[in-house]
């Protein structure tokens, strides 16, 4: 549904009147350009090349420039430009490498004027000189730029950018001889048309291809560039080196950028893919657009302000085969829907809170923040009545600082730097990390590492003196196996039965099996049984079940009315009636080596004193394997990791994930692991722990994280002498045959680690540069630059 707002603008002797409107095209558009009187617009594409008149209510087709019976590739346009001095002169860039000029004043149907066929690949951009009527500039995919004089049949100058392709060329509005060009490798070059041999200035503007650029119509040195890295940057070219003034973050690759007339800080952008909208940005407020046009249903390919002195009308063409005129008054304003409240924790525990100034002013006793008062990104620092959105409410920022030493994060940095994550056995890693945590006062974390070591590592044989402690800490694995139990001065209540009853009266003659940690209760003095290798702190009991179990009696928590830990006779069901006249001890001596003792013999054993030199019970093997299965504690470890992550300690969660590896990875879903890893890596990078961050990425068990350090690993190097790209892998330039990487201190070729100053580009061996800068801050090459090594 079309919006019916209407605007009338008086510009000198002419008047612009119109509304938001659109018309359907015969084919998708690749580029548009407006006539100097703002009354007509030309639309060009692979299958369309037409001129439309811009009337008050609609677009009216005036001329179709695609004439002829046979379709020609010369009419397949990648770009079109309308001369701003001669209203009859047009130029197009063809996909077959041809540059075509068109004369609308010719009386014939075919308006084609001249053909320039010097480019070998697709021409991406054409641009007329703003004040020179016969000068035309083109940039091609072949990496060359050509300057044409329309009074001649051939180009007058060829400029080599020493790159794969030229994406945009623009003449400077203020400097007569200067033009800017952008390239696939992220560089921007400034050229003087009188010196085609080398560029005047070159700098890297974006991480990836630079698709577009535009000179500011008022500020002489401001150049806006847009690239695949989703950023629009504003550069000040009047300084000795290009200085980045503003940076706007968008949500997709930037295909076109155009400064808004009469608004110094406003520019319009459209995206190359994904995003179909057109945005108008205030570069001082770089994260929320000032206006947004949402009429197109496919990628916008061309934008142009209708008049160089009118900020109200914007024209656009799209791949959805439509041509639109947007009225700025009808644009949606995302800043109106922005939330004026915000809450954020700082790196060292400080809390920042932003709210509407009206709410903060109403609260008494609030002290203003005296630090760097940077308002939230949605709102301008100072309200300017000249701006179109001056009535918007701004936010006031309050910062609650932590007390010195109260919420410091030094423990995080020390832990990250001192933790060992790989390169040692698991037991050593756990012990080392437990020691680090204990030294930093993090006792719970230290105890967790100790438990992980006990769970996943065999502690070996435990000495007799430390058995109680080992059992309490889960170290019962690998205890020495006892061969027999010897009896000495048994308590009267304990010896009534020694043969344990099997469930349901089973009379099998299996050997009595005892766990290595089990012993018999002795007399009231809690003495150890004679000849035993372990303390008598465990009670041999019989319960209803398939196997006999052992129950630990804690002597520290026994009831005061039970001073003697004896087994009541009723604890075991009687197998038969007790015999009053037992046989002599010699009868029992004959069966000392056998655990299969009859009921009467058991009675004798329980009542008559025996010599301590023989065994009553023999143990053939343990009830269960001394080592639990590896996955026995998996659920416990998983819950532990979730506990630490929920507490905000992703450092512990990630460290355990890396060290345990496949032992716990299968129990935690991939998305949760990736979330933990990215959170921890983000924290490490905030604290500038780059090496630790890279180590975590390398050791990551998540596929999505392990590839993070594999992106953007290519470094493009130019020769320091001829400024051309180094194509070979050696140290000698293929073009000028000179060594490219010479040390500024020792004047030898750097074949290893090379460090250079980003200010003057001089450098050399790392150790040499570090030693030089210890005594002098000036560049060792003698250029006079004050270098800094950090």
Image (cartoon, rainbow, N blue to C red):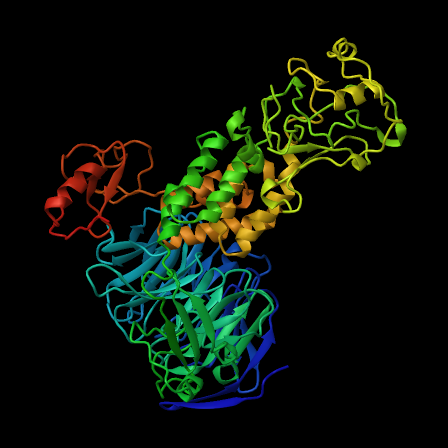
Q: Is residue 664 visible?
A: yes
In what quadrant of the picture does the N terminus appear? bottom right
- Asked if residue 709 is positioned above or below residue 237 in the image, the reply reads above
From the top left corner, tell me how far across and down residue 711 is, in percent.
45, 45
The spot of residue 404 in percent (x, y) is 31, 63
For residue 218, above or below residue 11: above
Q: Position of residue 628 (x, y in %)?
A: 65, 31
- The tally of labels here is 0
Front residue of this view, candidates 641 and 80: 641
> Residue at position x 42%, y 47% from top?
120
Task: Write down the quadrant of residue 591 in the picture.
Answer: top right
Q: On screen, 264 above or below 15? A: above
- Is 314 on the left-hand or right-hand side of 366? right
The residue drawn where x is 66% and y is 24% is 489
Q: Residue at point 58% right, 22% down?
A: 533
Nearest the viewer among 721 and 53 is 721
599 relative position to 208: left or right: right
| Residue 338 as seen in the image, left or right of residue 207 | right
Direction from residue 774 to residue 68 in the image, left or right: right
- Using the rendered image of the protein, determine whether residue 150 is visible from the camera's viewpoint: no
Give residue 124's position: percent from left, percent from top: 43, 57
Q: Nearer the viewer, residue 114 or 85?
A: 85
Depth check: give the residue in front, 282 or 238. 282
């Amino acid at each position: 549904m079309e919006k019916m707002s209407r605007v009338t603008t008086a510009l000198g002797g002419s008047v612009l009147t119109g509304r938001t409107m659109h018309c359907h095209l015969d084919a998708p558009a690749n580029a548009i350009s407006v006539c100097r009187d703002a009354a007509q617009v030309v639309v060009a594409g692979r299958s369309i090349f037409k001129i439309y008149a811009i009337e008050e209510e609609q677009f009216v087709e005036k001329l179709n420039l695609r004439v002829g019976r046979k379709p020609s590739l010369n009419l397949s346009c990648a770009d079109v430009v309308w001369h701003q001095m001669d209203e009859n002169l047009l130029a197009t860039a063809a996909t077959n490498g041809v540059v075509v000029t068109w004369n609308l004043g010719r009386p014939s149907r075919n308006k084609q004027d001249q053909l320039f066929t010097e480019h070998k690949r697709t021409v991406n951009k054409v641009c007329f000189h703003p004040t020179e009527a016969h000068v035309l500039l083109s940039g091609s995919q072949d990496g060359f730029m050509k300057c044409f004089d329309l009074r001649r049949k051939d180009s007058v100058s060829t400029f080599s950018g020493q790159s794969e392709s030229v994406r945009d060329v623009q003449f400077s509005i203020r400097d007569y001889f200067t033009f800017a060009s952008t390239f696939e490798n992220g560089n921007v070059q400034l050229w003087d048309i009188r010196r085609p041999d080398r560029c005047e200035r070159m700098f890297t503007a974006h991480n990836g291809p630079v698709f577009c650029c535009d000179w500011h119509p008022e500020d002489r040195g401001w150049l806006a560039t847009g690239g695949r890295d989703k950023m629009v940057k504003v550069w000040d070219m009047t300084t000795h080196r290009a200085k980045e003034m503003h940076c706007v973050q968008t949500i997709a690759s930037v295909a076109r950028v155009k400064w808004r007339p009469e608004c110094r800080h406003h520019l319009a952008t459209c995206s190359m893919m994904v995003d179909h909208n057109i945005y108008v940005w205030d570069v001082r407020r770089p994260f929320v657009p000032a206006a947004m046009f949402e009429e197109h249903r496919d990628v916008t390919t061309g934008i142009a302000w209708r008049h160089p002195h009118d900020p109200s009308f914007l024209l656009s063409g799209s791949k959805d085969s439509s041509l639109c005129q947007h009225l700025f008054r009808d644009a949606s304003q995302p800043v109106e829907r922005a939330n004026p409240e915000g809450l954020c924790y700082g790196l060292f525990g400080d809390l920042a809170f932003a709210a509407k100034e009206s709410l903060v002013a109403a609260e008494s006793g609030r002290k203003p923040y005296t630090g760097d008062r940077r308002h939230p990104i949605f709102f301008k620092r100072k309200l300017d009545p000249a701006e179109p959105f001056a009535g918007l409410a701004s936010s006031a920022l309050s910062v609650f600082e932590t007390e010195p030493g109260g919420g410091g994060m030094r423990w995080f940095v020390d832990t990250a730097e001192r933790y060992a994550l790989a390169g040692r056995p698991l037991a050593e890693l756990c012990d080392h990390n437990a020691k680090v945590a204990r030294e930093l006062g993090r006792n719970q974390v230290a105890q967790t590492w100790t438990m992980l070591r006990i769970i996943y590592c065999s502690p070996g044989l435990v000495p007799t003196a430390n058995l109680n402690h080992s059992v309490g800490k889960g170290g019962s694995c690998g205890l020495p196996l006892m061969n027999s139990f010897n009896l000495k001065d048994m308590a009267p209540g304990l010896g009534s039965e020694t043969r344990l009853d099997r469930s349901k009266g089973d009379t099998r003659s299996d050997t009595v099996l005892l766990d290595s940690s089990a012993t018999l209760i002795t007399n009231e003095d809690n003495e150890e049984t004679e000849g035993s290798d372990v303390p008598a702190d465990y009670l041999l009991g019989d319960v209803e079940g398939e196997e006999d179990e052992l129950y630990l009696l804690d002597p520290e928590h026994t009831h005061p009315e039970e001073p003697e830990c004896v087994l009541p006779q009723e604890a075991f069901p009687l197998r038969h009636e007790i015999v009053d006249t037992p046989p002599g001890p010699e009868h029992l001596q004959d069966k000392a080596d056998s655990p299969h003792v009859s009921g009467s013999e058991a009675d004798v054993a329980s009542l008559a004193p025996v010599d301590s030199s023989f065994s009553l019970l023999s143990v053939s093997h343990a009830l269960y394997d001394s080592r639990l299965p590896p996955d026995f504690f998996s659920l416990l470890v998983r819950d532990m990791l979730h506990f630490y992550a929920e507490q905000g300690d992703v450092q512990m969660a990630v460290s355990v994930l890396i060290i345990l590896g496949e032992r716990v990875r299968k129990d935690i879903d991939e998305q949760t692991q990736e979330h933990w890893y990215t959170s921890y890596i983000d924290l490490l990078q905030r604290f500038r722990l780059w090496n630790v961050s890279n180590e975590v990425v390398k050791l990551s068990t998540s596929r999505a994280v392990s590839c993070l350090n594999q992106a953007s690993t290519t470094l493009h190097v130019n020769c320091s002498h001829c400024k051309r790209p180094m194509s070979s892998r050696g140290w000698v330039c293929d073009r000028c045959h000179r060594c490219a990487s010479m040390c500024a201190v020792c004047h030898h070729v750097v074949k290893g680690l090379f460090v250079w100053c980003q200010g003057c580009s001089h450098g050399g061996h790392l150790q040499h540069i570090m030693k030089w800068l210890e005594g002098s801050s000036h560049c060792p090459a003698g250029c006079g630059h004050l270098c800094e090594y950090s």
